[in-house]
Amino acid sequence: MDILTHTFSGFACGTVVASLHQGSLFDKVGIVLAGSIGGCLPDLDAISLWSGFDQYIGSVLSLPSGREIYFGKYWYSHHSFTHSLVGLVSFIMTFSIFIIFRRSDQIKISSYHMFWLISFSSGYLLHLVEELPTPSGSWGGINLFWPLTKYYGGTGEIWWWNNYDI
């Protein structure tokens, strides 16, 4: 699936979660956006295909070519870490720590932030579920239980168009 479809799926998750929150319209928009971010964030690794990646990021970090990274089996390749449950937990922990330190006067996470994290998590999880029936490509599915090396899904049970392949 492409990043736009994943973003809209996350948007749908965020809409459901926001409808359960009793806060302001501004809070609800933030919760919907969190679902959208969660829906597209696992494809963050696709930046390796952006023009200029090899010249700027790849050369500075001494990485292989962007195409080799994207289609390869490195921990930072597509369908690897960011498409795993460990990746989801890592992002949730990062956002939670950010929220806590931002509100350093309190350790408590507000109701809004809980709904934000639930929305983000549901968008992210839906992204992983949506990847399971797509064709396996060069990865053989998604590395759902990273750091284990087994890839799951990739059954090819649905039509799939990946705009990164163009």
Image (cartoon, rainbow, N blue to C red):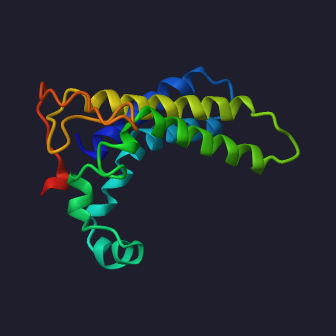
**Residue located 17% across and 47% down the image:** 162
Q: Is residue 89 above or below residue 105?
A: above
Q: Is residue 33 above or below residue 54?
A: above
Q: Position of residue 101 (x, y in %)?
A: 76, 49
**Residue located 66% across and 40% down the image:** 96
Please state which of residues 12 and 100 is positioned toward the viewer in this rendering: 100
Q: Position of residue 111 (x, y in %)?
A: 72, 28
Quarter where residue 143 is shown = top left
Residue at the farthest top position: 20
Of the 4 image quadrants, the one containing the N terminus is top left
Of the 4 image quadrants, the one containing the C terminus is bottom left
Quarter where residue 29 is shown = top right
Q: Is residue 109 above or below residue 41?
A: above
Q: Position of residue 149 (x, y in %)?
A: 31, 36
Please state which of residues 40 and 76 is positioned toward the viewer in this rendering: 76
**Residue located 42% across and 29% down the image:** 125
**Residue located 26% across and 28% down the image:** 152
Residue at the farthest right position: 105
Q: Position of residue 82 (x, y in %)?
A: 40, 44
